[in-house]
Amino acid sequence: MKKSIFGLVLLVLAIVVWGAGTLEVKGRVVSIDGRPVAGAVISVRSANASAVTDAEGGFALTLPDGDRIRLTVTHPDYFAEELSLSAKEISQSLIVQLTPLIRQTVEVSVTALRYPEPSTKIPAAQTIIPSELLEERLAPNITEALAFTPGVTPLGSGGFSLVPSIRGLARRRILVLVDNARIASDRRTGPNASFVNPEDLDRIEVLRSPSSMFYGSDAIGGVVNLFTKNPPSGDGISGRLHAGYGTNNAEKAYGLSLAGRKGTWGFYLSYQGLDADNYHSPQAEVLQSQYSQSGLLGKIVYDADARRVSLSFLGSRGTDIGKPNRTSATKPTWYPHENDNLVQLAWTEKSMAGGELAVHAYANPNFLETRTKTLSGTAVTKDSFSRTESAEYGVQVSFARMLGASFRLTAGADLFGRAGVKATLHEISFDASGNVTKIYDETAYDRGRSTDAGVFISADFSGVPNLDLVGGLRWDSLSQSAHAGGGTEAMDKRDDAVTGFLAASYRFTPSLMLFANAARAYRTPGLGERFYSGITGRGFIIAQPNLANERSLNWDSGLKWISPRLYAAAYGFIYTVDGLIDRYQVGPSIYTYGNVDKGRIKGVELEAEVYPLSGWKLFGTFAALQGESATTGAPINDIPPLRAVIGTRLWWGKFSAELSGVFQTAKDDPGPAEISISACRVFQLKANYFLHPVNIYFVLGNIFDANYLGRPDPEAMEEPRRGLRIGLSYSFR
């Protein structure tokens, strides 16, 4: 009887095993630039099965049949990837993308030269910040997202309104782009694109070399290009839901995004929101540091072999964005409303007359309001309000063609303008009883307009082994007009500019590359600098209609070592700017502008990233700058003190942790509108737990609760005290 039962059990097990069947999983493992990854290990722990990719990145696995499998893909030079696949997905040939430990080792196409070019060939100083880094930093705006980028420092008095400064140049000398559309701003410190939520970005490209030849005015100090997310590459619908909270300022972040594709058509749709109270320094609450922001991004893409067409809309609403400063208790200032409506159409014909034709048009009707109250105790003695509104627009046309196997020629024209610009002021004064004693209304200027129309041609030659040469010329016609003070006669300014760029890069070995470039660049003063006199976020500004254009000669060089586990780079630069426009304080909270005869900025930058062991990274950056008037030797504004970042990161499976420190020396040579500040050391701890489809992020800022001023701005407030930010995301498809 026992033998019969045992035999029956064996028969049942045999039937089950025979009936279960098997399936074959095939695919390829590639890097994010599409190159095959050989030697990657693909394993399925539940089936005790594994395979190794061949020279073409291919693999095949035979597994027991089932509804889902979980693949783990590992390689010593790449981050591990884990995928949960359904039966339908298993039946298809898989493409698994791995992210390299050192991202600079891959030939990712970037747009520093205005056309797609492999990042390792760019003869300039550039940094790419991918979406995964933006997500884990939990930064509420673009300036904070760039905090650890070499050569980039924040500028302003504090809070949500800080702008990025590159190599000591800011205040409209840094061109900010959103998907290649230019962004202007009527804030005195320049554009910061705070209306773009980092959650909506695929990557940020930071070009630290002057780029007027490629982009025209405002790129004299570099370019920050924000690229929004696109539809997925494969068919189907996916989404991401996220939420976050900050303990220091009760910051609440939330958002939902959906993306999908069906054949050649795709879409991306996102809503993001952000709201925060005042933050606290180690000493006290920092008044007027609150902010509220919400945005909607929609994009439709048609992508076929012959052409790519993209239509997008980015609408943003900022409310009660504070402007913290030293007088916030008695003279609070904030931006009640900031409104942007960026519409873009990009059309690329991938094969026309033997080359590629690209057309890009965009428009952004927008306005910014500024409000300041003057208090005596709890009574309001003065209420000041200003509003600037404009319609920005642009058109870009370019044609690129390969002439032979090693010569690329690109030519084009572009136009950027602002129309219908109007700045108005309204001020009410009160007596001690609250009665109105005076009402003052003024139009600072209206019917303002500006245009920058340019034509350019550039060439890229790589016909000599290991050598790449890039050069180009550009001519711009500039015009500005406004009716200052609401007058009947327009004040006109016209000019032109010729700029150029010449660069070379040479690869000594597969890992070692040297580059050098020389550039002529320029910046025309903004409408606000020439025509706006009135209240601002930091006080009162006096316009200077006779400001001259800034023109510069820039020398830049760098040496890079790029290998799978080590990236190191050293840069040196000298910028000479004729007619440098500087800001001066002429009274308590009263400022104006002037042209310095000649400003000179020079400096060095270092950066390194190394993986000594699997799952362990060391990284660091260093920047030292000096800026002065070439005629008097006096210091100029906006030159940051010596700054270094050092950190380490560890991975344990799905968990990672990073400790970093920012070391900044004292600033004892302030510019004419600055103050001296002390040295500081600030540490941050970051941790992530990836439990797909759920990701959890933690950022503990200012671990040791240091009390310090981050910038030599006379209105700057102490930086935030110790605080924790928590983020949670859920991805689905």
Image (cartoon, rainbow, N blue to C red):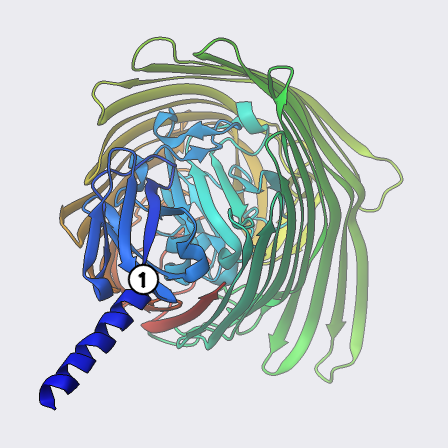
Q: Is residue 730 left or right of residue 121?
A: right
Where's residue 70, x and y in %?
31, 62
Q: Residue lying at the far right in this picture: please name it.
A: 488
The image quarter in which residue 424 lies:
bottom right
**Residue 649 showing in the rendered view:** no
Where's residue 589, x and y in %?
56, 57
- Residue labelled with disc 1: 21
Where's residue 329, x and y in %?
53, 74
**Residue 345 showing in the rendered view:** yes
Query: 704 or 133, which lies in front?
Result: 133
Examine the rendered structure and indicate whether residue 695 appears above or below residue 620.
below
- Kind of residue indicated by mark 1: Gly
Query: 354 or 592, which lies in front?
Result: 354
Q: Looking at the image, how many numbered discs can be counted on the residues?
A: 1
Circle 1 residues within 10 Å: few <14, some 14–19, many ≥20:
few
The image quarter in which residue 467 lies:
top left
The image quarter in which residue 257 lies:
bottom right
Query: In which quadrant of the rendered image does the N terminus lie?
Result: bottom left
Where's residue 608, x and y in %?
22, 41
Q: Residue at x 24, y 41 (%)?
A: 53
Query: 126 or 591, which lies in front?
Result: 126
Residue at disc 1, secondary structure: loop
Examine the rendered structure and indicate whether residue 206 appears above or below residue 574.
below
Q: Residue lying at the far bottom in this picture: please name it.
A: 1
Q: Is residue 156 left or right of residue 489?
A: left
Query: 329 or 200, which lies in front?
Result: 200
Q: Residue at x 17, y 55 (%)?
A: 615
